[in-house]
Image: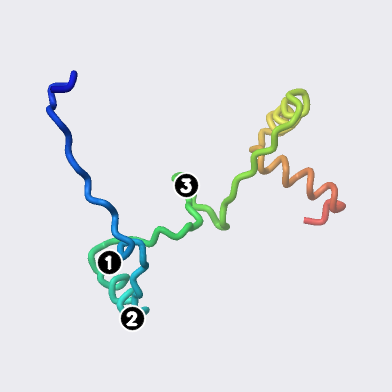
Amino acid sequence: MSKYGFGGGIELPQPSKASKARLKVEPDSVEKAVEAGKSLGFVSREGSTRLKPGPKRKEAQDKVSIPGPKRVVDEFRAFCQERNITLWQGLELLLSEKRGGSD
């Protein structure tokens, strides 16, 4: 008996070479499977634009993460707080000023 209280061991079957071959799948059967899944309430795993809770968004949302010196990030946050605007509104304001204020 082993130190774990089990005697001997088990023999695992050797994998056959046939199991590695990919099965041919008919496109029609895939479509039927997808339709069957939809009818059962399954949803697509494809990426989609998610809307967060809160006020209804009028346009698609995205996220940007820009690491930089703390002094610059702090200055940008202060800029937005002084104007009582969100970070994205501050970015939009700076971009519109760069374009010449035509917005």
Are the residues flagged by discs 1 and 2 in contact, CB closer than 8 Å?
Answer: no
State which tag comes first along the sequence, 1 or 2. 2
Mark on residue 37?
1
Residue at 37% across / 67% down in the picture?
Answer: 22
Considering depth in this image, is 102 or 41 the residue closer to the camera?
41
State which tag comes first along the sequence, 2 or 3. 2
The image position of residue 101, as x and y in percent, is 83, 51
Q: In this picture, is 94 found above or below 76?
A: below
Q: Amino acid at mark 1?
A: Gly
Q: SS for tag 3?
A: loop
Considering depth in this image, is 91 or 103 the residue closer to the camera?
91
Q: Amino acid at mark 3?
A: Lys
The image position of residue 27, as x and y in percent, is 37, 79
The image position of residue 50, as x and y in percent, is 48, 52
Residue at 35% across / 62% down in the picture?
Answer: 20
**Would you name the residue on which mark 3 appears?**
52
Are the residues flagged by discs 2 and 3 in contact, CB closer than 8 Å?
Answer: no
**Would you name the residue on which mark 2 appears?**
28
- The crowd level at tag 3 (other Cα within 10 Å; few <14, some 14-19, many 20+) is few
Residue at 85% across / 48% down in the picture?
Answer: 98
Considering depth in this image, is 2 or 87 the residue closer to the camera?
2
- The crowd level at tag 1 (other Cα within 10 Å; few <14, some 14-19, many 20+) is few
- Which-is-in-front pick, marks 1 and 2? 2
Q: In this picture, is 6 found above or below 52?
A: above
